[in-house]
Amino acid sequence: MSASTPSKPSADYRVLTQGKDFYMGVLAALITVSIWSGWLISVRLSASGQLTSFDLAVMRYLVPALVLLPFVWRHREKIRNTRFRYLLGMLVGAGVPFFYLSSTGLQYAPAAHAGLLIPGTFPLFVTAMAVLIYKQPLHPARFWGLSWVALGVAVLMSHSLYQGDLQVLKGDLLLLGASFCWALFTVSLRVAGLPPLAAAGLLCCLSCGVLAFLALMGWYETGITTASSQEIATQLVTQALLAGLLAGFSYGFAINRIGAENTSAIGALTPVLTGLAAIPLLGESLSLAAVLGMLLIGLGAYRASRIRDA
């Protein structure tokens, strides 16, 4: 796809690769799912550590920005020719706003909820954008699948409301906001058509600019001086190497090969991995509502993906 996006990008919105390239895209999406699960667990773990959300954000964006800066420079003409609204969508969708919403939400809600509500629900937002903005037809299989996803979210949040746990409900709402941001990033990245490493590098560079502004204004807290070397090393690997570099590439690669909607549908499998991993790693238990929500969202994602028909 050309970096100079046409005035009506809907014609190119669902152009997918075929054969080996398509299955490579599926593999990249599955790798991304695994990294997302580990990232959610690590952010939840940080709530009991010394590092703050600002510290984690610096790790998440600064190191990848330095590593990927050559790719940003190499593709500077493509970036310059990309519409500003797509670049802004990428920045808001996967930059500091997304990081703030997700990390703050995880301070109130369990990791299993984050796995359900961020990657589990953003296929709803992605498809809504595809239908409303790009005038894509809504296939019946995708409609019913996403209906199951919506039902799973309703079950999860109604349980928190019924229990009167307003803190968890607050976290759930913040996580839904993060999900919408990620959907915005997904669609913006798809229509921008930038190479995966250049897109990931640009996102990290712009996010570093936002973090620098926050630091200059004094709007931050840090615990880097009191954190243990083990905590710093663990978060550095998770935030910078896995989430920042590897997932940044694999996600962009998947979107360019199999499209935004198929990638988001595969991403909705993250709740299963996150929920199961949270049991031994975080000592969390899965409520009946969480299990039911996981089943509905997972089955809905599979139903909505229509991978075999792509």
Image: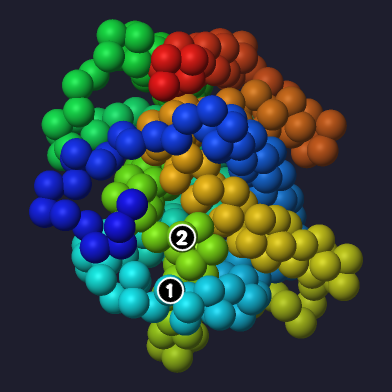
Q: Label 1 sits on what residue type? A: His
Quadrant position of residue 55:
bottom right
The residue shown at (20%, 28%) is 136
Callout 1 secondary element: loop
Label 1 CA crowd tier, 10 Å (few <14, some 14–19, many 20+): some
The residue shown at (30%, 57%) is 2
* Residue at the outermost left position: 7
Residue 29: mark in rendering? none
| Pointer 2 residue | 195
Give the answer, above or below, for where 262 lies relative to 302. below
- Camera-side residue of 158 and 5: 5
Closer to the chain start, of discs 1 and 2, is: 1
| Pointer 1 residue | 75
Image location of residue 232, percent across then percent down: 79, 69
User: Given contact means CB atoms under 8 Å apart, are the residues at marks 1 and 2 in contact?
Assistant: yes
Image location of residue 137, percent across then percent down: 19, 21
Residue 89 appears in the figure: no
Image location of residue 301, percent across then percent down: 48, 19
Give the answer, above or below, for where 78 lies relative to 234. below
What is the CA distance from the residue labelled 1 to the residue labelled 2? 8 Å
The residue shown at (72%, 78%) is 224
Q: Label 2 sits on what residue type? A: Pro
Label 2 CA crowd tier, 10 Å (few <14, some 14–19, many 20+): many
* Residue at the outermost bottom position: 216
Q: Quadrant of the C terminus?
A: top left
- From the viewer's perspective, tell me whether residue 158 is left or right of residue 131: right
The residue shown at (61%, 14%) is 291
Image location of residue 96, percent across then percent down: 45, 65
